[in-house]
Image: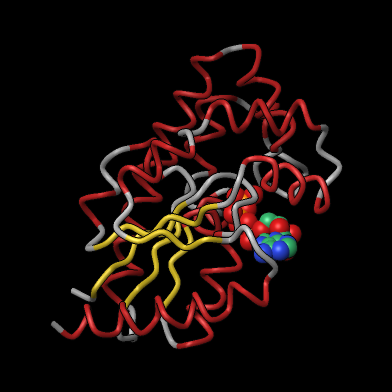
Amino acid sequence: RPYVVGLTGGIGSGKTAVADGLGRLGAALVDTDLIAHTLTAPGGAAMAEIETAFGPAVIAADGSLDRAAMRALAFSDPAARGRLEAILHPLIRSESARQCAAAQAPYVVLVVPLLVESGNWRERCDRLCVVDCPESLQIERVRARSALPEAQIRAIMAAQASRAERLAVADDVIDNSGPLAELTPRIEALHRRYLALAKR
Ligand code: ATP
């Protein structure tokens, strides 16, 4: 199977920026967020099971998952969140394995936002890369991109692994605490490293 680099980092750390940069250089990208969206899009492979589990209240008019309704349900009923994950996770895992195996590239970047938190992903990866920046910058960047209030961003961060926990398990750390211009040469250096590792 192709060489797989797991890429993770906290909310707003810059996972997308790093993955896109490696992709432009020739890596294949497998994005678990994108897979989750496809599974819950109209006609998506998870939708029948989701409707059976939660009823029509969480189904939008176009047949996709009504994310706001699902979030409200998961908030009022924590077990519902677990049931949703029990439906989605096996599908995400099998689809990501399929995409990794089918990749036509020197190596694959498997983007998993909660890689450190959810276990089982690490064994799928030959190498673990963590995108790192100070928490204050994560908040600043997420606020610049969305209308999410700071308290909500902090709540999401509190539910994720800490910066120290991620750094402790990383094989490679890419520092994204500077401007994007500084990120580019770091992405190029990582790409060279992964080309060499994949060849071994
Ligand atoms: P999420 O987990 O929330 O999807 P992410 O880890 O994929 O986030 P990105 O989407 O890459 O992070 O970056 C978050 C936001 O910060 C984006 O709007 C992005 O354009 C911006 N950003 C990323 N890196 C930098 C940087 N070095 N300087 C300035 N802005 C940046």
**Which quadrant: the N terminus?**
bottom left
Write down the quadrant of residue 4 in the picture: bottom left
Residue extending furthest right? 147
- Of 150 and 76, nearer the camera is 150
**Which quadrant: the C terminus?**
bottom left
Horizontal relation, residue 158 to residue 64: left or right: left
Task: Decide: is 63 above or below 185.
Answer: above
Residue 114 in picture, x, y percent from top left: 45, 42
Visible residue check, residue 41: no
Task: Decide: is 10 above or below 26.
Answer: above
Visible residue check, residue 118: yes
Horizontal relation, residue 4 to residue 79: left or right: left
Task: Decide: is 67 above or below 92.
Answer: above
Horizontal relation, residue 95 to residue 122: left or right: right
**Residue at the image position 65 percent from the left and 41 percent from the top:** 65
Task: Decide: is 130 above or below 139.
Answer: below
Which quadrant contains ligand 1? bottom right
**Residue at the image position 22 percent from the left and 78 percent from the top:** 197
- Of 51 and 16, nearer the camera is 16
Write down the quadrant of residue 104 in the picture: bottom left
Residue 93 in picture, x, y percent from top left: 34, 51
Residue 125 in picture, x, y percent from top left: 26, 59
Residue 173 in picture, x, y percent from top left: 41, 59
